[in-house]
Image: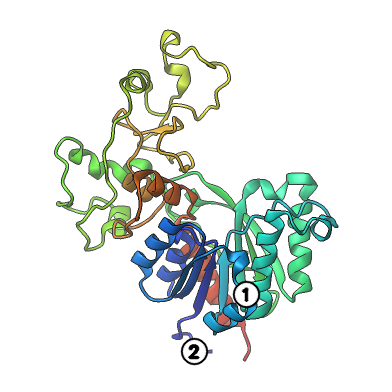
Amino acid sequence: MDNKKKLNVLDLFSGCGGLSQGFKMAGFNIAGAIDNDIDSIKTFKNNFKKGKFFVKDINKITKSEIKKNFKNIDVIIGGPPCQGFSNANRWHKNQNDPRNLLFLKFIEFVKIIRPKLLLIENVSGILSRLNGNIIKNINKILKKNGYHINYKLLDASEFGVPQLRKRVFIVGNRLNNEDFRKYLKNKKKVTVGEAISELYPLEKNFKNKLNGTLANGYIKYLRRKNSKLPNHQIVYPAKSTIEKIKHVKQGENWQSIPEHLFKKNRNNRHSSAFKRLKENDFSVTIDTGNAHSNYFHPIFNRIPTPREAARIQSFKDNFEFIGSRTSQYRQIGNAVPPLLAKEIAKTFKKIIFNKWKI
């Protein structure tokens, strides 16, 4: 196979396109995407332009529509819910479980399209939940359809992302038994400060453009030749929240808040509650809320803006999110960090171009 040929990717349960952005950066062509969230697909279209992108309940897509719209697909990627596959026989008995239906639809796409490789992303708990039966049954189903399966729990912080974020990645390979894991290479560690500190001067004198030198390698990656800064809406919380968080130093959490300011459910809080990020460390896992109290800016008494959260997720500044501020946070928090996705995509290229015998 000509290694200059661009391989086509179909992204199922795509969200805004974190996985696809990583594959695009690795040289793949994003041929299509499906998600049932309108804003996510608007964001996807805004950033990928060419391809067949659908806002639709994936269960309502017919076999004929799959064949018609998605030809010559080399790779299928996505994050289908897998929790319904909890024991050896349950997926046969409870096929009306919505979680089962979504995963089975993913498998239907695989059966019809027969991609060379597939990628499933899921939360880390899938490995241990119900004595590991979920991952065992995913393995069994995909193996039955002709795919060799390998999987690994990856932490985004080990791949150049300034964030602790652990997710499981399951790879199906119908070309051979080549293991993607041996091609993975860790990258230089990046801190929160390296990702967002250059934005501090914009706090009081907000502008929509960035000027000045590119301070570090990560900033060069984020900005390239781009000087615009979309999705950087600076919003401060209620005075009562500011009064609490101003007592919390970098790396500390709710325990630093005086008791008279924070009495309700004080001893029933997760360690990440009212956590202030540290400039010289990784971020906690970016979540989907804009009204949360799980992580706060290292310097200012507010949560990170959508753009700051996107930078911590490793989205470039020219990747613009469409929708309300709440929608932007949800899209960013649900996404796979593009830099992590890129490293996985690079292993796919090695497997296909170096190992597949035509």
Secondary element at image label 1: loop
> What colour scheme was applied to this rendering of the protein?
rainbow
Secondary element at image label 2: loop
Which quarter of the picture shows residue 67? bottom right
Q: Nearer the viewer, residue 256 or 44?
A: 44
Q: Nearer the viewer, residue 216 or 64?
A: 64
Which residue, given by chain and number where applicable, does mark 1 sit on? 62
Q: Residue at x 40, y 48 (%)?
A: 327
Q: Position of residue 297 (x, y in %)?
A: 34, 34
Can residue 173 be seen here?
A: no
Query: Across the whole image, how many numbered discs are drawn on residues?
Result: 2
Q: Earlier in the sequence, mark 2 or mark 1?
A: 2
Q: Residue at x 38, y 76 (%)?
A: 50
Q: Residue at x 79, y 58 (%)?
A: 91
Instruction: Say whether marks 2 and 1 touch (CB < 8 Å).
Output: no
As drawn, is 128 to the left or to the right of 307?
A: right
Q: Amino acid at mark 2?
A: Asp
As drawn, is 148 to the left or to the right of 214?
A: right
Number of other residues with Cα within 10 Å of mark 2, as a class: few under 14, some 14 to 19, many 20 or more: few
Q: Position of residue 102 (x, y in %)?
A: 65, 60
Q: Which numbered dot is residue 159? A: none
Which residue, given by chain and number where applicable, does mark 2 sit on? 2
Can residue 219 be seen here?
A: yes
